[in-house]
């Protein structure tokens, strides 16, 4: 039985997507404890004991306490990082490590808990090369891709596969004049490649001539598929120029999605595909913590209810 067993929602204070899920759970009288692991230890505490009978203990915020042995499900969204500004740089590095492996390890080890998604599995799936390799194994069409720090290899790849785009392998916090920014997808020409490529790893990918993009959001057994039309290289750069339409994913795509999620042990995934001029679906990436609520507001697809269903059911 799941009566009185709480759902943990791990995310930042400002997360409108988490807000709507929590409201839905509250409307169902499902207890929720929201926490940001980045608040540890200032306003978040943990006391967990592991014995022959397993893990037990509590995690507490200023307003809520959760019994770790009774958590029915954990929605791992986008918590902030650990910070110890009052410590020296060396001591802060040590404290962050202890917090990550201590609190993080406890939250990743809850008995009988359904994870959406498990943070360790999410970490594995966030590596783009791993995702692309898993996509090939799942049977998806994947554009030719190069990961390199070799300028000559980059120029050769572009000449053989052009047109080619550059994608960041990951997008950490990046400030430009103090303002948060991201590195965008961009066209890459052979003549633009210089020795700076040797400074770190870069991802180059053949640009597929496309007729549309498709976002497929998988929530447990539910699949929500939305066609996104625009004239943009990367539709994320201007949401005001997008139009949306619910569509059905081809059966082979749904089968591939299930294989992909099983490979990483995920129950949620936000898949990005583009549709080529011949109608073929090309896998681009899967974000294990991707945004989805704006698609519900645009299309009316019941994603929030599906996620609340999943979290409410837990592993029963």
Image (cartoon, grey):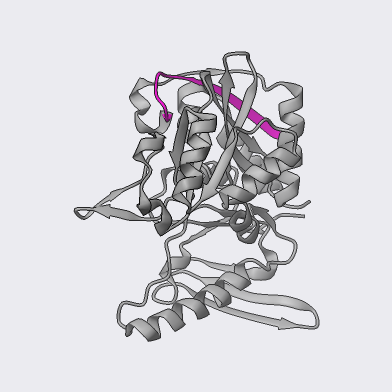
Dominant SS in magenta? strand
Report the residue at 75% width, 41% height from top. 137
Residue at the extreme left of the image, as rendered = 177
Nearer the observer, 310 or 230: 230
In this view, 49 is above or below 66? below
Q: Is 8 displayed left or right of 178 in the figure?
A: right
Q: Is residue 221 visible?
A: no
Residue 286 is situated, as x and y percent measured from the top left of the image, at 59, 41
Number of callouts in the render?
Answer: 0
Hey, which quadrant is residue 72 in on the image?
Answer: bottom right
- Image height of 15 relative to 64, above or below: above
Kindly identify the residue that appears in the image at 62 percent across and 28 percent down. Answer: 282
Q: Is residue 233 magenta?
A: yes
243 to the left or right of 255: left
- Confirm whether the magenta stretch covers residue 185: no
Rendered location of residue 263, percent (x, y): 74, 48
Q: What's the residue at 67%, 30% (across, down)? A: 141
Q: Identify the residue shown where x is 41% and y is 55%.
A: 172
Q: Which residues are magenta?
A: 222-234
Check the image and report above or below for 126 versus 228: below
Residue 71 location (% of width, % of height): 66, 62
Q: Residue furthest top?
A: 278
Position of residue 254 in the picture relative to residue 172 (left or right): right
Residue 6 location (% of width, % of height): 62, 58
Quadrant location of the N terminus in the rendered image:
bottom right
Q: Can residue 258 be spotted in the picture?
A: yes
């Amino acid at each position: 039985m799941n009566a009185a067993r709480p759902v943990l929602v791990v995310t930042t204070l400002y997360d409108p997507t988490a807000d709507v899920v929590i409201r839905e759970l509250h409307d169902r009288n499902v207890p929720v404890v929201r926490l940001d692991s980045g608040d540890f230890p200032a306003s978040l505490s943990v006391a967990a004991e592991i014995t022959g009978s397993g893990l037990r203990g509590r995690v507490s915020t200023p307003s809520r306490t959760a019994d770790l042995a009774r958590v029915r499900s954990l929605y791992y969204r986008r918590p902030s990082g650990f910070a110890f500004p009052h410590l020296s740089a060396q001591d802060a590095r040590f404290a962050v490590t202890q917090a990550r492996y201590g609190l993080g390890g406890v939250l990743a080890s809850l008995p009988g808990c359904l994870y959406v998604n498990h943070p360790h599995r999410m970490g594995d799936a966030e590596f783009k090369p791993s995702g692309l390799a898993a996509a090939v194994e799942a049977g998806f069409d994947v554009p030719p891709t190069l990961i390199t720090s070799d300028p000559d290899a980059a120029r050769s790849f572009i000449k053989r596969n052009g047109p080619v785009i550059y994608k960041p392998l990951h997008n950490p916090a990046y400030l430009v004049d103090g303002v948060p920014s991201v590195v965008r997808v961009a066209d890459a020409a052979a003549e633009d490649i210089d020795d700076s490529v040797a400074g770190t790893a870069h991802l180059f990918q053949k640009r597929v001539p496309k007729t549309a993009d498709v976002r497929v959001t998988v929530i447990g057994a539910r699949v929500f598929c939305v066609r996104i039309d625009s004239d943009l290289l990367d539709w994320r750069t201007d949401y005001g120029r997008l139009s949306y339409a619910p569509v059905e994913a081809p059966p082979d795509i749904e089968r591939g999605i299930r294989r992909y999620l099983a490979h990483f042990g995920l129950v949620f995934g936000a898949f990005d595909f583009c549709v080529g001029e011949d109608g073929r679906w090309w896998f681009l990436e899967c974000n294990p913590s991707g945004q989805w609520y704006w698609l519900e507001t645009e299309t009316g697809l019941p994603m929030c209810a599906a996620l609340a269903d999943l979290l409410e059911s837990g592993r029963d």
